[in-house]
Image (cartoon, rainbow, N blue to C red):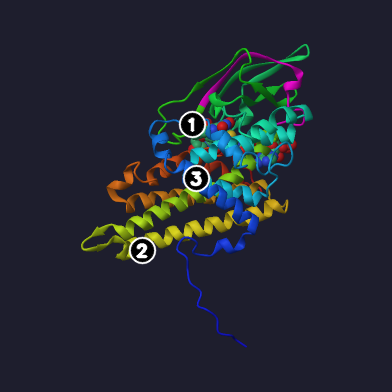
Amino acid sequence: MTTASAPVTVNPRDFLAIDRQLGDEERDIRDVVRAFVADKIVPNVGEWFEHATIPLELARELGAIGVLGMHLDGYGCAGASATAYGLACLELEAGDSGVRSLVSVQGSLAMYAIHRFGSEEQKLQWLPRMAAGEAIGCFGLTEPDAGSDPGTMRTRARRDGADWVLHGQKMWITNGSAADIAVVWARTDDGVRGFLVPRETRGFTTQDIHRKLSLRASVSSELLLDDVRLPASAMLPEATSLRGPLSCLNEARYGIVWGAMGAARACLEAALHYALERQAFGRPIAATQIQQAKLAQMALEVNRGTLLALHVGRMKDAGELAPEQVSMAKLGNVNAALEVARTARQILGANGITLEYPVMRHMVNLESVVTYEGTADVHALIVGGALTGIQAFR
Ligand code: TGC
Ligand code: FAD
């Protein structure tokens, strides 16, 4: 028997009613981060981007709303679900990819490395302060000649008595010069190992990378390690090979799966608003078939990508998410977000190239997002390898 019910209506901001798939706590966390972004990020980020800066006080404010290492348990971390963390990443990146990067590197890379591979002493020393944003971390894997292929890293750590001595160079390190503690990966006689290098350590210096056209509201640095002497206790005891740093990447890539949809959503919303307001040939451009087709495709990508993120979030919470599945989702969602941003930029016409609107900022930021944490090519090859059983990197 059918019963009469109210007609179902569509919300343009949540076309497939994904909100209904979330629990109350997930919605609450999402709303706190959304309000923070509207209040602290959106009004200021154009300025930060223009001047290639990001205020470091932001770390404490992000700590205060509980998003730093929020998916980790204990040591001052919030112990939230992976899905809640993903929703936070989405809202942060709707503000700017650089802000989400700060949070990703802090929580998913530096804090995760210490939480997963550190000694109890290391965890107690660093994690509570990092969760509060009182200490900033960075994660040094990439080198000038070893990006996609970190297995060819040259940075070396050698034993000298009980100490370790590190020599080498890391490149493109987010939060590098801002960091109180650097997680540095180095080759040893015994495989790749991770080391905690405090900022003030003798022989350790940083140099910021300037003239970036992307991710300008983010610190990117070179780390220089000139025979840096560290005590034995600086090594992460539980990471014994390249598997260590690659495991951390799964965490950050997962956050990007969600984050990219935040950037895409912000572009869709800006384009929709603009198309309804902008008059050409005596009517809003939103009244033309060609712009509606673009908006429909963008909305499809945002909804599909967000559903994909939610799906992998639920898999991660169930402990059933494989690295290859993260790769497929990072590949798909970042490429989709780039397409949405590029289309939105065109809908905004000349205004689309300015910082008065968020669209081109997101578009150029996504050029970094598609490159870091494994390029689109690398993720396609990981998925291809899982499909065919044939490893095509070498
Ligand atoms: P391969 O022989 O495949 O693997 C070596 C060992 O690692 C294991 N493994 C993984 N474990 C956990 N998670 C993963 N995703 C893993 N991928 C591989 C593997 O099972 C093996 O373990 P074992 O015990 O048998 O030794 O290594 P390979 O040298 O052939 O490289 C594979 C490849 C290309 C997939 C890997 O090198 C890779 O992912 N390259 C991309 C590098 C990358 O993504 N760098 C990111 C740097 S950090 C960053 O960009 C931060 S951006 C800032 C922000 O997030 O905002
Ligand atoms: P390369 O590895 O030199 O690749 C160049 C091109 O070759 C790419 O198109 C790539 O897809 C392609 N390619 C490579 N190998 C293959 C292959 N086998 N088959 C086909 N094509 C291939 N790293 C960190 O460790 N920590 C950070 O915090 C960090 N933050 C970053 C922030 C920003 C803004 C950026 C831009 C980068 C950051 N990175 C960081 C570095 C990032 O992870 C690397 O840039 C990325 O892994 C790619 O390495 P690469 O730039 O050396 O490119």
Q: Position of residue 355 (x, y in %)?
A: 35, 41
Neighbours of disc 1 within 10 Å: few (<14), some (14-19), many (20+): few
Q: Nearer the viewer, mark 1 or mark 2?
A: 1
Image position of 309 (left or right of 336): right
Kindly report the distance in space between the C-alpha atoms of the residues bearing marks 1 and 2: 39 Å
Measure the C-alpha gap from mark 3 to mark 2: 29 Å
Numbered disc 2: secondary structure: helix
Q: Which mark is residue 292?
A: 2
Label 1, on which residue? Answer: 55
Residue lying at 34% horizontally and 43% vertically, measured from the top left: 356
Question: What's the magenta region?
Answer: 221-242
Q: What residue is disc 3 on? A: 37
Determine whether label 1 and label 3 are within 8 Å by CB: no
Task: Reply yes or no: does residue 229 show up in magenta.
Answer: yes
Residue drawn at (60%, 49%), measured in percent from left and top? 86
The total number of labels drawn is 3
Q: CB of residue at label 2: within 8 Å of ligand 1?
A: no
Q: Is residue 247 left or right of residue 305?
A: right
Residue visible at 70% across and 45% down in the picture:
79
Picture quarter with the N terminus? bottom right
User: From the viewer's perspective, is 67 left or right of 189?
Assistant: left
Please name the residue shown 53% across and 51% down the image: 332
Which is in the foreground here, disc 3 or disc 2?
Answer: 3
Tell me the CA gap for discs 1 and 3. 14 Å
Q: Which mark is residue 334?
A: none
Which of the image's four quarters has the C terminus? Answer: top right
Mark nearer the N terminus (1 vs 2): 1
Amino acid bearing label 1? Pro
